[in-house]
Amino acid sequence: MDSMVQERIGATLTEETTKDRVANLNARWRTIQAERVLRLALLEEFPGRIAVSSSFGTESAVLLHLVSRVYKATPILFLETGKHFQETLDYRDELIERFGLRDVRLLRPKPSELLQEDPDGDLYANDFDACCALRKVRPLELAMGDFDAWITGRKRYQNESREDLPIFELDTTEKVKVNPLANWSPTDVETYFKEHDLPRHPLEAQGYKSIGCATCTTPVADGEDPRAGRWRESEKTECGIHVTADGKVIRTRLIDTTDQA
């Protein structure tokens, strides 16, 4: 083989190896930072007064695994909308068992409000926002009465409205919101999945990159925005539970918390 060709091949391999090394170092550094943020929030700043909100979607395993490394009894709030894919519910149960999560709470809409506002279960077909308010926003607001702060898995790269997402922010109810993965990149997420051999959401292989309710989520094509499948053909990009203090919308055991009428 020509020596110049060998040199070019060697240089390319070195460049690729260096890029991979840098990506892995960045991912590891961010992992350490995220865990430190979680330790600060869970054990020092808001002990006993903070929860994690999780959709148990395609990237949720990363945050939940980090939380389990810090404090397995952290309250995990899951919005049981009644419209989830069965695969999401099965994945939720798998992660709970695998990570040893001890306090996962199911937040449901009030039966009386469901009967009044969505008796036929098809409100989503006419009003996405009203459906999200009924099945997500109000149940979470009610549950958050027991907490001063909450942790989310949001990241800046997920959509344009999250480009300036801070690690700590204040929401409209004066609760502190903690986003330990705010500055993570897609490479960081993938690296963490591989390093810790985390299970993937079963629908991800079918083209679902961002997963919400089955009624309002579709697969996305290669190269398409991962959240394009959420509320497709509408201008809606967030369910409404992520609102900052200035009003800007950005985004074990199971405990059923909503037996109330």
Image (cartoon, rainbow, N blue to C red):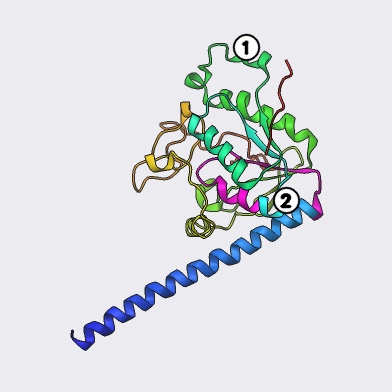
Q: Decide: marks 1, 2 in contact (CB < 8 A)?
A: no
Q: Earlier in the sequence, mark 1 or mark 2?
A: 2
Q: Which mark is residue 71?
A: 2
Name the one closer to the observer, 102 or 66.
Answer: 102
- Horizontal side of residue 158 vs 46, given as left or right: left
Is 220 a magenta residue?
A: no
- At 44% from the left and 69% from the top, the residue drawn is 20
Q: Which residues are magenta?
A: 44-67
Q: Residue furthest bottom?
A: 3
Whether 203 is drawn above or below 155: the answer is: above
Q: Which mark is residue 257?
A: none
> Residue 202: image x %, image y %?
45, 40
**What amino acid is labelled 2 in the image?**
Tyr
> Residue 98: image x %, image y %?
59, 45
> Residue 144: image x %, image y %?
74, 35
Is 56 a magenta residue?
A: yes
Name the one closer to the observer, 252 or 230.
Answer: 252
Which secondary structure, mark 2? loop
- At 66% from the left and 16% from the top, the residue drawn is 111
- Horizontal side of residue 211 vs 148, given as left or right: left
**What amino acid is labelled 1 in the image?**
Leu
Which of the two marks, 1 or 2, is nearer to us in this view? 2
Q: Which residue is mark 1?
A: 115
- Horizontal side of residue 224 vs 198, given as left or right: left
